[in-house]
Amino acid sequence: MPPNILLFGTGGVGTIYAYLLSQGSATVTCVCRSNYTHVSTHGFTIHSAIFGSHISFRPSRVVRSPAEASPSTTNSNDSPNEPFDYVVVCSKADPPDDATAIDLIRPAVTEGRTAIVLCQNGILIEESWRAAFPQNPIISGVVYLPVTQVSLGVISMGPLEKLLVGTYPSSLPSESAAKVAVKRFVEVFRKGGGTIEEHEDIQPARWVKVSVNAAWNTSCALARQTDSGVLESCPGHAMEAVRETMLEVIKVGNVVMAGEGKGEAELLKGGIVDEQLERAKGRVQKGNGVEPSMLTDVRMGRGLEVEAIIGNVVREAARIGVKVPRCQMLYVLTKGLDEWLRGNGVEKWKTEGEGGLPMKV
């Protein structure tokens, strides 16, 4: 029987994953909030460098909230909603947002059955979900997917699509419900045409990805530029600044992994930092930079994933005694920007100016 899946967070990433899981024969219910009216009427339109343009996609069902699809309620046919096998979370990973997401999806989670798949940025994001749902499998996902919702229900996706998954915690027996749930999820995702890898321990992959996010998301958000725009704006220094920031994160991750008995050299295997930077340099040459999620949030006047992406790195560094001056400065500046955005700073500055210096937005 095809798995029954709830997709929470149908922006760019969530829509692509809903599409791939549907292509893999899953029954997919999408929770749409700001784009509910458009998607429930017209569905999604996907323009992808991999899957093609003008793809029309309608999920099995569109709801305003997880509670609307809860097994304790009835559907439009007055039949009870089927319990979900998976809840895929593609919303922001940050303390205020996570607390809200946990409360919102709780009605859709069946204890002991529903696996929760966290397709989110950052490190140290899983424990709050494990504490909230101790009887449910937790699957942690590392997302490589340059994608943006350019208008309501319209998704633009770049030429990279890869999802890495593993259980949380990693030290579970192969016959555990979480390990079984991971394998089934991988099968469905792959059947739908997605690129997915199962990792015995997903945390090293999380540290590698957060090295990219900590450097690029913060720099692009603060500069209001794509990654190639940042590099072009200061060609003598930008590349080195980004590289050294990534290396700070990798150093913290190496020490953390070594402390957990996972080997200090693991994260640097294969020259991962230079490999990531080569991609960005290639985009400069082609003139098609990537807009990280933080930059999108700045453009839209939304709060940022500061704590999960950079704050947790800085706190882990302090805990283990590793100096990360670049990360620390980026954290302070990005945290200030986040506070400004969450306090409606964009609108205030548009209408009033600040300190006599009006800002053009």
Image (cartoon, rainbow, N blue to C red):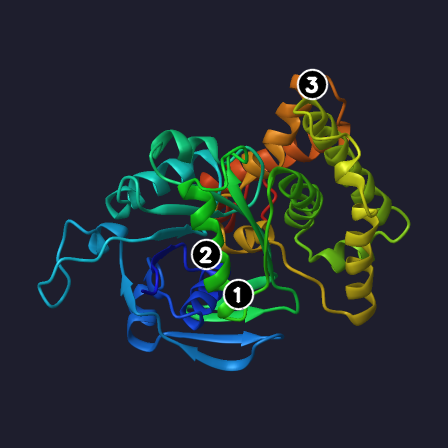
Residue farthest front in this picture: 175
Q: Is residue 39 visible?
A: yes
19 or 311: nearer the eye?
A: 19
Mark 3–mark 2 distance (CA, rounded to whole Å): 35 Å
Q: Quadrant of residue 60?
A: bottom left
Ranked by sequence position, the earlier of labels 1 and 2 is: 2
Report the disc number at residue 185: 2
Q: Are marks 3 and 2 in contact (CB under 8 Å)?
A: no
Q: Are marks 1 and 3 in contact (CB under 8 Å)?
A: no
Residue behind mark 1: 190
Side of 304 relative to 32 (left or right): right
Q: Which structural element holds mark 2?
A: helix
Q: Which structural element holds mark 1?
A: helix
Tell me: residue 358, above or below residue 285. above
Q: Amino acid at mark 2?
A: Phe
Residue behind mark 3: 320
Ranked by sequence position, the earlier of labels 3 and 2 is: 2
